Amino acid sequence: MVYVIMFMLLLGVILLVTGPLRRPLAPPIDGDADAEQDEKSPERIDLEAARDAKYREIRDAELDHQTAKLSDADFEAIDSTLRSEAIELLRQLDALDDRANERRVRASVSKDDDGKEEDDPASREDDEPALEREHAQRAAE
């Protein structure tokens, strides 16, 4: 009888411990996160790695300055150079993001465009005379 109780207790512990391993993987909460991970181009990965490395270099230079390994003049020269390089990397990443956003917009427009011209007021904002005529017609009705 004692062996049966011990066996049941051991079985319960095993099931409790291995429970997370037996569950299927849950789908990601945000489906766009996986899409973004899949979209990462080699250029983006390289730029992000270079950005992270540049941040480490800046932190290392600051630490060297704090520990008096670098003089004030040397630190200012190195820091300004590193920060300008980091800014350039950030600009390149922003440009890459802008190009990716443009591609997404074009892709969504091509999906929505089925050959019909949509009545989109935002696209007609520059055509003020046409808008005024339309408002006048609505007011007359």
Image: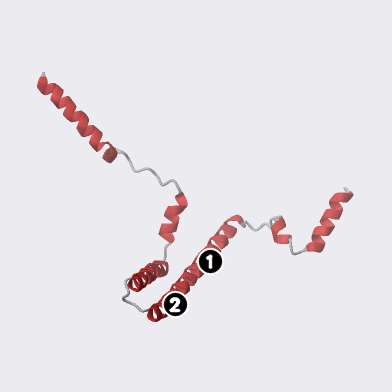
Looking at the picture, tell me which residue is in the foreground, 117 or 70.
Answer: 70
| Identity of the residue drawn at 40% across and 45% down | 27
Tell me the residue that label 2 is attached to. 80
Mark positioned earlier in the residue sequence (1 or 2) = 2
Q: Is residue 21 left or right of residue 78?
A: left
| Identity of the residue drawn at 34% across and 43% down | 25
* Quadrant assignment, res 136: bottom right
- Mark 1–mark 2 CB contact (< 8 Å): no
Q: Position of residue 70 (x, y in %)?
A: 34, 77
Q: Secondary structure at mark 1?
A: helix
Q: How is the image coloured?
A: secondary structure
Q: Position of residue 2 (x, y in %)?
A: 10, 20
* Quadrant assignment, res 52: bottom left
Amino acid under label 1? Asp
Tell me the residue that label 1 is attached to. 98
Amino acid under label 2? Ser
Q: Quadrant of the N terminus?
A: top left
Q: Is residue 48 above or below residue 22?
A: below
Q: Is residue 17 above or below residue 47?
A: above
